[in-house]
Image (spheres, helix red, strand yellow):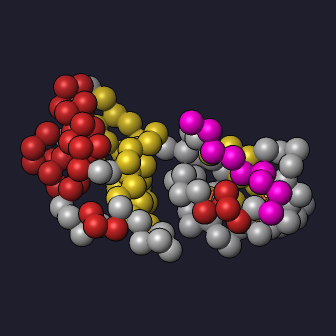
């Protein structure tokens, strides 16, 4: 049995396709949607907790990649370079999941990586390149 939190990125052409339903019907997987978001580029982002038998899980992943869905583990590839961050706050309103917030008392910007859905919007927005993608 496997249970993982993953981020699925759907290109625009796939956004209205019943792809996640197929994971249930054809691969006997269970899912719990944690977050859903459409980026300004009209790419669909879905954060799921997906679980099922080992073989079905792997087959489901192959199916997703085969149709053109990018699959990533949740947030493990986005980090903040604390030495670079100037707490300017530019990234805060851009972050769709509330992973970047201004602490009211200190006015420092906190990064809660457990909330990050790896959408990468902050990467381009940060003026000092403090937000980094690691593969
Ligand atoms: S990648 Fe950046 S903007 Fe996107 S959810 Fe994570 S912290 Fe927020
Ligand atoms: S935009 Fe960059 S420098 Fe500004 S608060 Fe966010 S991570 Fe820090």
Q: Residue 44, percent across and down?
A: 38, 64
Residue shown at 50% from the left, 74% from the top? 40
Q: Quadrant of residue 30?
A: top left
Q: In terms of depth relative to the viewer, which is nearer, 99 or 126?
A: 126
The secondary structure making up most of the magenta span is loop
Point out the stretch of residues depicted in magenta.
Answer: 127-135
Quarter of the image with the C terminus is: top right
Asked whether residue 128 is drawn in magenta, I would say yes
Count of marks placed on residues:
0
Asked whether, in this view, residue 65 is left or right of residue 129, the answer is: left
Residue placed at 19% from the left, 25% from the top? 55
Residue 119 at x, y percent in the picture: 53, 57
Residue 98 seen? no
Establish if 8 lies above or below 27. below
Residue projecting furthest to the left: 26
Q: In this view, does 3 lie above or below 75?
A: above
Q: Is residue 68 visible?
A: yes
Q: In which quarter of the image is the N terminus?
A: top left
Looking at the image, which residue is at 38% across and 36% down? Answer: 4
Q: Which residue is drawn at 18% across and 46% down?
A: 23
x%, y% of residue 71?
38, 44
Query: Is 132 part of what is drawn in magenta?
Result: yes
Horizontal side of 119 relative to 17 (left or right) equals right
Where in the image, quadrant-wise, is ligand 1 located?
A: bottom right
* Foreground of the two, 83 or 107: 83
List x then y, in percent, for residue 59.
Answer: 19, 33
């Amino acid at each position: 049995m496997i249970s993982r939190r993953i981020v699925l990125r759907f290109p625009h052409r796939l956004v209205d396709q019943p792809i996640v339903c197929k994971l249930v019907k054809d691969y006997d997987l269970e899912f719990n949607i944690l977050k859903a978001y459409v980026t300004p580029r009209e790419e669909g982002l879905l954060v799921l907790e997906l679980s099922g038998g080992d073989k079905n899980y792997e087959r489901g992943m192959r199916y997703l990649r085969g149709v053109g869905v990018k699959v990533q583990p949740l947030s493990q590839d986005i980090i903040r370079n604390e030495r670079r961050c100037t707490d300017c706050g530019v990234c805060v309103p851009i972050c769709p999941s509330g992973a970047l917030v201004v602490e009211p008392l200190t006015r420092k910007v906190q990064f809660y990586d457990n909330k990050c859905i790896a959408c990468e919007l902050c990467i381009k927005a940060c003026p000092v390149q403090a937000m980094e993608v690691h593969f």
